[in-house]
Amino acid sequence: MIQLDEIQKRLLREVADLHKVPEGAYNIRSNSQSAGRQSTANIEITSKTDVSGLDIRIKPGTKNESVHIPVVMTQSGLKELVYNDFYIGEGADVVIVAGCGIDNCGPQDSEHDGIHRFYVGKNAHVRYVEKHYGSGSGRGKRILNPGTEVYQEEGSSVEMEMVQIKGVDDTERMTTAELAAGARLVVRERLMTHGEQRAVSTYVVTLNGEGASADVVSRSVARDLSFQKFDAKIIGNAACHGHTECDSIIMDQGRILAVPGLEANNVDAALVHEAAIGKIAGDQIIKLMTLGLTEAEAEEQIINGFLR
Amino acid sequence: MLELRNLSFNVSDESDNKEIIRDVSLVIPDRRLIVITGPNGGGKSTLARLIAGIEKPTSGAIIYQGEDITEMSVTDRARRGIAFAFQQPVRFKGIRVLDLIRIASGKTLSVADACEYLSSVGLCARDYIDREVNSSLSGGELKRIEIATVLARNARLAVFDEPEAGIDLWSFQNLVEVFQHMQRRIENGSILIISHQERILNIADEIVVLRSGRVAAHGPREEILPTLIGTASAVNPCRKLEEGGAAQ
C-alpha cells in the first residue's frame, strides 16, 4: 500500500471516518492512483480495462460486510472521470462507503467526477454513505460532480446518505433510480454551501413496479453568497408511494431554488412533495439564548441539529 | 431578589402609541413562588419577556441580585441565573430532547441525569430522550420538555409564561405538582409564574394582579385570592373535573 501523507489521512477521516485501513473490502484512490486495495471472499474489486474505475461484485447472500472506496485528491489541477459499477447479488446485505475529499492549495481547479452505478439484485439491501469534503486555501476550485444510477430489482432496498458540508466550490449531482415491484429507496441528503459556492442536486426516481416506494429528503443550508438548486422528480408508473422533501435554511445572501416534480402515470400512484425554505426562526435563537448561549452559538446549534 | 423600578413598555406604529406596561414597580423576594395574574391583554406576558430580556423596556430599570440588568442581553441574564419558559414552546428540527436539556444544564450531562429532569415532568425518559423537539411532539409534551429545560438550568429566578396554555387537563394537574415540588426545593431563588388558573394561584406565596399594564394589587395569597375568585383573573379549568376529582 502506498504511504499516505497527513493531508491525505485527514481527508480520509473526513469522507470515510477512516482512521486506519478499513476491515473488509476496500480501494483507496489517491491522486488518480490506487493507494491500496483488498477484496474478500464475497466481495471482489477489480479495475476496469476500458475506462478509469472499478467493478465491485458482491456475491448473492453476502451479509454484514462492507466496502470502502474513498477518493482523496491533493494535487492542484487534477481532473478525473471515474466509473464505479456495483453488482449486488440477490439477498445480500452490505454497507458501501464512498466519498471524496479534495485539498487544493494551488491555483488550478481540481475536479473529481465519479459515476456510480448500482445494480441491486432481488431482496438485497444496501446502505450507501457518500461524503464530500473540500479544504485548502488555493485559488483553484474544488469541484465534484457525482452521478449516481440505481437499478433496483424486486424487493430490494437501498438507503443512501449523501453529505456535503464543507469546502466544495462547485457541484452538480445527478441521481437517477429505477425501481421494480416492492423495491424501496430512501435518500437523505445534507448539504451546506458557503462563500460563493454553487450546488445543484437533481433526482429522477422512476417507480415502475407495484408496491415500489421512494422517500427523498434533502436538508440544506445556504450561507453567504452561495446558491443551491434542488430538483427532485418522482415518476409513478404503477401502484406506488413517492415522497420528496426539500427543507432549507437560507442565511446572509444565500439563495435556494427548489423544483418539485411529480409525474403520476397510474391511478394508484400516490406521490407527495414538500418544500420549505426560510431563515432561522427568531424564536429558536431566543430560546437557546435563554438557555445561556450567545446568538452565534445558538445559530451553530440550530444548523448542526438541522444537518445532523 | 428581583426588583422592577418604574418599568414602562410602549409599542408604537404609524398611527398609535400603545402603553403595554405602565410604571410598574415590584419586588420579587427570594424563596417565594409568585403568580402574576390579571385579565387578558393586561401585560402579563410582556412583563415576563421584559424580565427575561426578550423585550427591552421603554423606561425604568430591572435590578437583579443588586445588579442593574436593564440593558443586559438575554444570554447574559440567562448566565446570571434567569430562566424562562415560553408560552408557546419552540420547535427545532434535528435538535433532540437530550441536546436541549444538555444545553440548558450548561454541561455534558449524562443521559441518566437528563432523564431525571424528564421524569420529574412526568415524561417516560426512555421514550423521549432521543426524540427531536419537532412537530411530532404534542403541545403537552413540548410544554413538559420546556419545563424540563428550565429545571435543568437550576435557575435562581425561573419565569414561566402561562405554563398551562396548550396542555390538557391531565397534564395540567401534573404541572401543578411539578411547581409544588419546585416550591419545596427553593433555596435561594424564586419562581415567577404568569397564569390566571385558580389551581396555580392556589399554590402561590404572593399574587400580583396586573391590569391595563399597572399593578392593581399585590400581596399574600390569603389576602388577594378571595378577591379574584369568579373573575377572569382566577379561572377554573373545569368545574366538572374538579367536583368529580377525576384528575386525581
Image (tube, coloured by chain):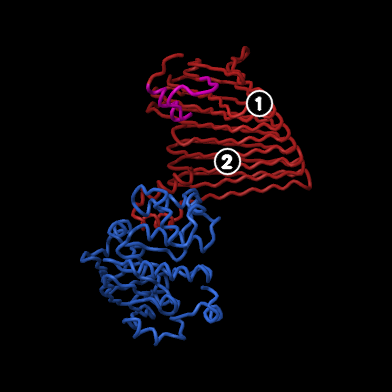
Chain colours: A red, B blue
Q: In which quarter of the image is residue B208?
A: bottom left
Q: Residue pushed farthest left?
A: B66
**Disc 1 residue type?**
Ile
Rendered view: A295 above or below A122: below
Residue A88 badge: 1
Q: Which of marks 2 and 1 is nearer the N terminus?
A: 1
Q: Categorize mark 2 by other alpha carbons within 10 Å: few (<14), some (14-19), many (20+).
A: many
* Front residue of this view, candidates B51 and B212: B51
Rendered view: B204 above or below B101: below
Q: Does the magenta stretch include residue A179?
A: no
**What chain does badge 1 belong to?**
A
Highlighted range, magenta: A6-27
Where residue A202 appears, x then y in whole percent?
60, 36
- Residue that label 2 marks: A230
Where residue A3 appears, x then y in whole percent?
41, 15
Q: Is residue A142 left or right of residue A260?
A: left
Where residue A292 appears, x then y in whole percent?
33, 54
* Front residue of this view, candidates A213 and B97: B97
Q: Residue pushed farthest bottom?
A: B227
Identified at 58% across, 35% down, the residue is A160
Is residue B92 in sight in this rendering? yes
At mark 2, the secondary structure is strand
**What chain does badge 2 belong to?**
A
Q: Residue pushed farthest right?
A: A267
